[in-house]
Image (cartoon, rainbow, N blue to C red):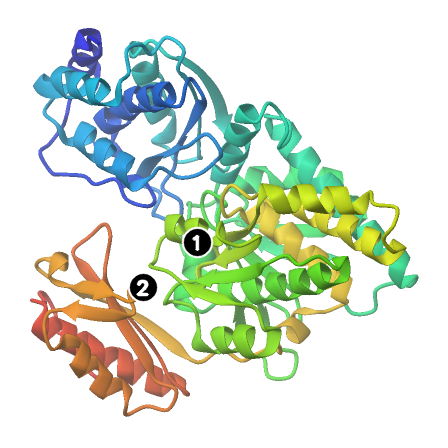
Amino acid sequence: MEFGDVQETGEKNFPKQDETPIQYGTAGFRTKGSRLNHVIYRMGVLAAIRSATKSGATIGVMITASHNPEEDNGVKLVDPMGEMLGPEWEKYATEVANVPGSKLDVTLQELTKNLGVTSLQSSRVVFARDTRPSSPVLAAALEAGIKAAGAQCQNFGLLTTPQLHYIVRCINTNGQYGKPTEEGYFEKLSEAFVKLRNIRKAKKMKTLEVYNTCLYLDAANGVGAGKIPILQSKLGDLLKISLVNDGSGKLNHECGADFVKVQQKPPTGVNMVPGQRWASFDGDADRIVYYFMGVTDNRFYLLDGDKIATLVAGYLKDLVQETGLSLNLGLVQTAYANGSSTRYITDQLKVPVACVPTGVKHLHHKAQEFDIGVYFEANGHGTAIVSNSSYNLLQKTSQNTSISDHQSEACDLLLSVIDLINQTVGDAISDMLLVEMILAAQDWDVEQWNKAYTDLPNRQLKVKVKDRSVIQTTDAERKASSPVGLQSAIDESVAKYTHGRSFVRPSGTEDIVRVYAEADTQSAADKLANEVAVLVYKMAGGIGEKPKLH
């Protein structure tokens, strides 16, 4: 194949601006929006090539930087079933993004030759963007790249990241997963939510006494803010959403899921009333965390991804048991999962737990090994995945006239729950509806939910280093294999604290090492985190200000 026109257009309109390398990671490319023109143009071409290797299946491209500051932006490709790119294609993306403009033609020729691609005329790419100021310009660069490659494309405008994942899967399943439009997305979720709420109301035969239909939502001034009024119009009085950070302020600035999780406090300017149920999205609405102010102690309580995971897994386990089917349910976590949550899931819920390295692609892949796999990162990104065979079995069983009415109803109920879940990727809107449905079904308020188990106090720190690759890890990132001696030193520090646990891992995008620690008190967790940060600084080439023990 020839890519002379692609190179000429790129050199003329989207030239490579600097020689600073950029790497495609789990979240795609992310950096300052001003640096991304040439990268996103080239990703348009790569998406067309990816589509060709999938026999013309539609590939998605999302322009967003999620929870990053407003001046940042990014891009990631979405595979045919709504999945993220695999490791091999992450390498291709990194190579194409970094090659000098004068060698783009040759690089693309070699890539398509190695992949056996001879034409891009049947390739199809759909794309969307978030609300960042740089997104419209970058969307134009992306479209130019797709068209320069000779592929077909469709611009879906402003969408949340999970909505694009959903649409890609709908297109490639010929509508079996749902209607491939934003309206189809809202129809599927809202209809499932309304059905489930009505079923539970009928079974209880009484007005809910504890669950409050009002939810206070911080939309991080992101793209999700504009979608909530659409959702609200379809839910009526079943869920009333009071919106703050509705897009009128700066994106992700002192608000949003990442801010609340890391700072462990409400968004700036929010005056919480004790007992109110609050939630926060991130900028592209693929993360959600809940929180509240205690009624008796006025303390801030965070209900993060771990709390959501245990709520969902517990509810699904009970529902699976009611169906009478032998479905294998499992929960997938990362090392960042709070130790109390893991013990609660294992000892109380009796649900198998698997631990994988940080990154959604690892969690998603592992969750696929179960009939029903639930995964959540502590940051609030997560979903549940149901195997096709399990879904088909549920459908067949629900129609079986020889089973009890109770089993048939349980199968039908579980099928509706599955319709409420966006299985392609973590989805703040879908997860919000799932949590709200479960709380209503249990007739719980947030305090009752929170009492399932008590999180161990924890602390996260960052240490600047010359070269993050000095840190190597094993055991799903829970142990440091290099530098030599670091892990034994960490173990010595951890042994001094009750319920102590700590691990370190290199950042995937910048030269920092992330430190996580937990212990029985906040002061102990803080001290352990500082001790480990000092060890990393000394043994891994720390730069800048040295961590100080409190």
Answer yes or no: is residue 212 visible.
Answer: no
Q: Residues within 10 Å of mark 1 (few under 14, many from 20)?
A: many
State the residue position of label 1.
366
User: In screen coordinates, is 6 left or right of 218?
Assistant: left
- Given residues 394 and 161, the one toward you in this image is 394
Position of residue 364 in the picture relative to residue 105 (left or right): right
Q: Mark 1 is on which residue type?
A: Lys
Q: Residue at x 57, y 52 (%)?
A: 371
Other-residue count near label 2 (Cα within 10 Å), few / some / many at <14 / 14–19 / ≥20: some
**Which residue appears at 48% of the width and 45% of the height?**
221
Q: Is residue 239 above or below residue 60?
A: below
Q: Quadrant of residue 96?
A: top left
Image spot of residue 541 (x, y percent) = 7, 67
Can residue 367 be seen in this snapshot? Answer: yes
What residue do we see at 57% from left, 67% from top?
A: 310
Q: Position of residue 78 (x, y in %)?
A: 41, 33
Foreground pick, 78 / 159? 78
Q: SS of the residue at dot 1?
A: helix
Q: Which residue is mark 2?
A: 476
On the image, the x and y values in percent for residue 536 come to 15, 72
Q: Nearer the viewer, residue 384 or 71?
A: 384
> Residue 372, relative to residue 41: is it above or below?
below
When asked about the image quadrant of residue 110, the answer is top left
